[in-house]
Amino acid sequence: MIELNGISRSFEGAAGVQVKALRDISLRIAEGELVCITGPSGSGKTTLMNILGCLDRPSSGAYRIAGREVRTMSADGLAWLRRRLFGFVFQSYNLLGSATARENVELPGLYAGLSRRVRKKRADSFLAQLGLADRAGHLPGELSGGEQQRVAIARSLMNGGRVILADEPTGGLDRENGEQVLQALERLAAAGRTVLIISHNPKIAARASRCIELRNGRVIGDTGRRLTRTRSPEEAIPPARKGQAMLSRVLGVVGAGWNAFRAGLTRGARLRAALLIAAILTAVCWGAVVMSIGEGTYREMIETANTMGLDTIQVMPADWRPAPTGEYGTSSNGPRNFLPLTQADARAIRDQIPNVRDVSPYVMLIPLPARRGSIATPVQVIGFVDLGAKPGRGSMGYSLEAGEFITPSEDENLERVAVLEPDIRERLFPSKIDPLGQEIFIGNIAFRVKGLYQRRHIPGMLFVAGLAAHVPFKTAKAMLTSRNEIDQIYVYVEDADLLFETVNAIRDLGIRRRGGDTLRFGHMGETIQEAKKTRAQLWLVLGATAGCVLVAGNVSVSIIMLMSVRARRREIGIRMALGARQRDIQWQFMSETLATGVIGGLLGIAVALACLPLLAWFEVPFEPAAWFFAVPFACALILSFLAAIAPARRAARLDPAQALAAD
Ligand code: ADP
Ligand code: MG
């Protein structure tokens, strides 16, 4: 079974001195032997045991176990041997403190891929064999030393335990408990297992089939083989189907990570864990909310652009202000010193600029006196024909409540018709008469009311004055003002995608006709660009802050987990001794670290969903979409995955023997 040939093991001591723990040991141990290893402290017993149990490798020499050469095996290959062949019993029991007796016994089965059900069944039967049936649900801290050691023996049998290695198993026990433990080990040997016990107890030496004495790393006495084997080893462990074994293992390992995470929550580290989760929660929530607000703002601006008309360009002199009408009233606007637009300009734009469908000149006359019967009130008259109007809906946010828009033919025929905004209509028609078709006076000219506007709603604009009356441009020009110039020109384009090109062409034309760049343009192309820019800025700036919080949170998680790996070396060593592969340990720590990210991320989404409706309260526009939650959550996951790598690797790469020796 076991064949050592010239095994040596030396350690790099402090100050570079080589400590030779084992020197040139050659041994053969057959299956079914009960071997007692004795020797003074420091003679190399534990080192030998570690090498036998594949927790450590010899510095030189050859070791064959069950016909396999150990020297060339990988770390996971050694883990496989530990899982399949060995059961360990330590002086200090080495049970996981946060797991019950049954869970401790189940542990090797987890790494062997046994299903939950099989693990539990086997664990219960071994516990019963060792007289611990009623202790299965207890934590190690609730058990006596002898009971804990018997739990450890039950654990060593979980995967078959063909070779039981017991390092001073009775060292910490009183005589009676020690005796129980010894008898248990003897029974295992009698059942055909190979049992190696390190002990100073002469009684064991007397009862063992063979006694090996070590001193200064050498074998100085060996009573030789006295094989007392009577029976062949009992049942092999039930083979698990491969996929199923994998699944059980992964579930078990991830479960171990999750348990460790939960244990972390309930221990002193609760506040720390809460803070880390809060950091990730904040970042994810913040990210989702910011993206929603960015999109909401964008949508609102696009909506504005749509109500104003995407194919409309407003052209006006750079310093344009409403004109004091002079003839009809007073104005505090003061003198206007800019070069006004003329109708010739409007015609030139229509005739010379490509992509222009039509133009519409625009005058604004404020204020003029309006009158109906005995009611008199000032009115803001706009002479304009909205050529961009669609049925029921004008450009610039106008829509009709009743009646019709002013038509080009009314303009052509200088008809005296008016469409009223809500405020002026209320002033002129305070009683319930229907204003449509009624006559009002602007200045001294009678106009027929042919339409009523709804109150304009322009998103993002809090208050839109409603004191204007729209009349045909030419009517206004002919009857209401003696001014020659016009205030603005509305240009309607064929292809809205070429808005900017058209604006530039009009600007060039303006420079030529007016001798300088003195025109100002209003159009929604800018709004849309602005909207995209605003959204991008929001996403970038605020998203970056969320990212920073996320990174900082995960760096903290990583640091804390690295410290935790250091503090939990013993636990890692135990798991490795029980057959955990490096990957198992890695996944366990990965899932433990990732738990912070997953919980923080999920809570972040929940809080964001709860908070978004509150934004409406503050009139902040928002527009959630699934990926606004998915992206921050994914970022949280990816970052916590990255944060998990270093601690998990460090844990997986610990040397089993050294990890076990850690305090
Ligand atoms: P025993 O178990 O018989 O008391 P050990 O096998 O633990 O003895 O130790 C044998 C010798 O090897 C001791 O001198 C000890 O100091 C040394 N030794 C064991 N492990 C290490 C190690 N990891 N690094 C350095 N020296 C070690
Ligand atoms: Mg020792």
Image: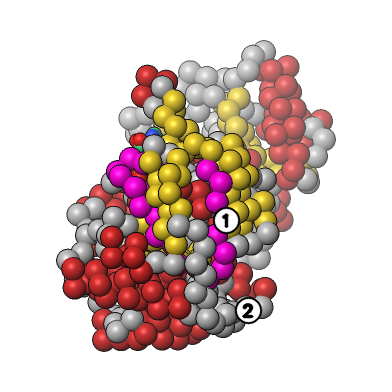
Q: Amino acid at mark 2?
A: Pro
Magenta stretch contains residue 278: no
Q: Where is residue 32 drawn, in percent x and y?
A: 52, 71
For label 1, the SS is: strand
Packing grade of label 2 (10 A; few <14, some 14-19, many >=20) is few
Residue 656 image label: none
Magenta stretch contains residue 41: yes
Residue 239 image label: 2
First reached walking from the N terminus: tag 2 or tag 1: 1
Q: Amino acid at mark 1?
A: Arg
Q: Quadrant of the N terminus?
A: bottom right
For this rendering, which residue is in front, 337 or 535? 535
Question: Which region shows up in magenta?
Answer: 25-46
Numbered-mark total: 2
For label 2, the SS is: loop
* Ligand 1 quadrant in view: top left
- Is there any visible trace of residue 72 in the rendered image? yes
Seen at 38% across and 41% down, the residue is: 215
> In the shown orientation, is residue 253 left or right of residue 359?
left
Q: Where is residue 627 drawn, in percent x and y?
A: 55, 58
- Is there any visible trace of residue 640 in the rendered image? no
Q: Where is residue 451 drawn, in percent x and y?
A: 54, 65
Q: Where is residue 640 drawn, in percent x and y?
A: 46, 49
Q: Does residue 408 sit above or below 495 in this rendering?
A: below
> In the shown orientation, is residue 542 left or right of residue 168?
right
Seen at 64% across and 62% down, the residue is: 66
Q: Are marks 2 and 1 in contact (CB under 8 Å)?
A: no
Q: CA distance from mark 2 to mark 1?
A: 29 Å
Mark 2 against mark 1, which lies toward the viewer?
Answer: 1
Residue carrying label 1: 28
Seen at 47% across and 33% down, the residue is: 10
For this rendering, which residue is in front, 564 or 26? 26
